[in-house]
Image (tube, rainbow, N blue to C red):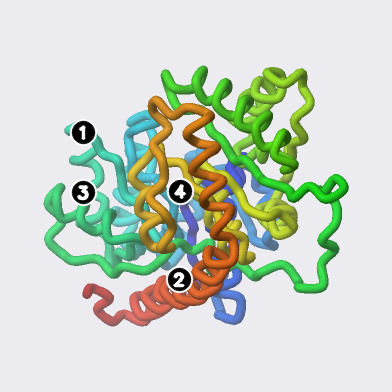
């Protein structure tokens, strides 16, 4: 069975690559022949052992589409128009291309939205209505599909990244501590007009953590847009904030996070990768998907990035840190539950490919 995978893979975003890593684990023992639409086919093959083709080379994509049995979207927030309308347009176009070629279309672990424009909603309706199976990663995404007019109820699972293996327990836990200072990861991201405030916010937050005998470490989750941001955050403190950058796989980030006390994260998959290795994430909301994740994990409601001050963030975080034992117990329980939920993605995939009705 030949599957063509579509998503924002090997494009420098380790969150999307974590989805591919989880999918790879989920189908490890299944007889699938995989081809990935990739931003960097060489990296996709090197890291995941999967054949890949350039995601925007039309002739190569068409040839792979002709040969596959199904077009599969393993997950991510690809149907949204916050960054631009191009994302929704690109993936909706692939669905049309697949259906024209007589192929099955399977959506797994989707985080849908936000969809603000009429055109984005219209394209999303067309794509999800044409699908042979739809699985979303949270109830909010299911509700959004209903709101835009999708009549068939999707399956609700969890993000595919929860299928990633946890780093070995005998791993080296040294590397980020300085003396008796516990390490706190920080995974920021740019956010429109708030970006200048984000630079100031996390620079000051790093200073406050250091004063409290905690070692801040900035984490680059997206090479294209986070690198300049974390450089500027470091520069607010004289370039003295340690950082992790240039990682080529989510497993590398996961292994480093596993040695930390906790992670302060705007990035959804910064939080998910922390949870997969039992590290409690303190989330900061800029998007409904972060709120949805916090709710799924039974975490405190995350503060919103808009208008957030370093003092308020620091106070909230220190309260979170004091509940460390409780938070770790919750995360240990929830990661097992969400891994089980994420397995539904693979079950639906198998059911659909066998020709059975995968609708709920």
Disc 1/disc 2 C-alpha distance (Å): 33 Å
Q: Which residue is mark 4?
A: 62
Pointers 3 and 1 in contact (CB under 8 A)? no
Which comes sooner in the sequence, label 1 or label 4? 4
Which comes sooner in the sequence, label 1 or label 2? 1
Q: Which residue is mark 1?
A: 119
* Label 1 vs label 2, nearer the camera: 2
Instruction: Tell me if residue 212 can be seen.
Output: yes
Disc 1/disc 4 C-alpha distance (Å): 25 Å
Helix, strand, or loop for circle 4?
Answer: helix
* Label 1 vs label 4, nearer the camera: 1
* Label 3 vs label 2, nearer the camera: 2
Helix, strand, or loop for circle 2?
Answer: helix
Which comes sooner in the sequence, label 4 or label 2? 4
Instruction: Tell me if residue 20 can be seen.
Output: no
Helix, strand, or loop for circle 1?
Answer: helix
Q: Which residue is mark 3?
A: 126
Rendered position, 65 above or below 197: below
Q: Which residue is mark 2?
A: 338
User: Image check: 243 left or right of 191?
Assistant: right
Which comes sooner in the sequence, label 4 or label 3? 4
């Amino acid at each position: 069975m030949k599957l063509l995978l579509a998503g924002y893979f090997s494009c420098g975003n380790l969150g999307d690559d974590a989805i591919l890593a989880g999918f790879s684990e989920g189908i490890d023992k299944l007889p699938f022949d995989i081809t990935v639409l990739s931003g960097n086919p060489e990296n996709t093959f090197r890291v995941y052992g999967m054949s890949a083709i350039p995601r925007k080379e039309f002739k190569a994509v068409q040839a792979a589409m002709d040969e596959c049995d199904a077009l599969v979207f393993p997950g991510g927030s690809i149907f949204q128009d916050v960054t631009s309308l191009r994302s929704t347009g690109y993936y909706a176009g692939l669905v049309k291309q697949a259906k024209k070629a007589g192929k099955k279309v399977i959506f797994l672990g989707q985080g849908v939205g936000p969809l603000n424009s009429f055109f984005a909603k219209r394209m999303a309706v067309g794509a999800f209505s044409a699908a042979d199976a739809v699985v979303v990663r949270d109830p909010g995404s299911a509700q959004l599909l209903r709101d835009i007019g999708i009549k068939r109820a999707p399956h609700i699972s969890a993000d595919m990244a929860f299928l990633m293996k946890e780093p070995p327990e005998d791993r080296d836990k040294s590397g980020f501590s300085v003396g008796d200072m516990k390490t706190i990861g920080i995974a920021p991201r740019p956010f429109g007009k708030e970006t200048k405030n984000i630079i100031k916010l996390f620079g000051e937050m790093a200073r406050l953590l250091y004063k409290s005998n905690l070692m801040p470490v900035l984490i680059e989750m997206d090479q294209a847009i986070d690198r300049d941001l974390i450089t500027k955050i470091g520069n607010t403190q004289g370039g003295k904030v340690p950082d992790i950058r240039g990682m080529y796989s989510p497993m590398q980030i996961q292994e480093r996070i596993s040695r930390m006390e906790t992670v302060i994260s705007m990035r959804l998959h910064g939080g998910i990768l922390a949870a997969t290795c039992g590290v409690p994430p303190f989330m900061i909301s800029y998007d409904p998907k972060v709120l949805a994740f916090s709710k799924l994990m039974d975490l405190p409601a995350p503060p919103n990035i808009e208008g957030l001050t370093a003092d308020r963030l620091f106070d909230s975080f220190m309260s979170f840190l004091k509940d460390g034992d409780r938070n770790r117990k919750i995360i240990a329980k929830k990661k097992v539950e969400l891994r089980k939920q994420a397995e539904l993605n693979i079950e639906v995939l198998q059911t659909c490919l066998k020709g059975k009705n995968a609708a709920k």
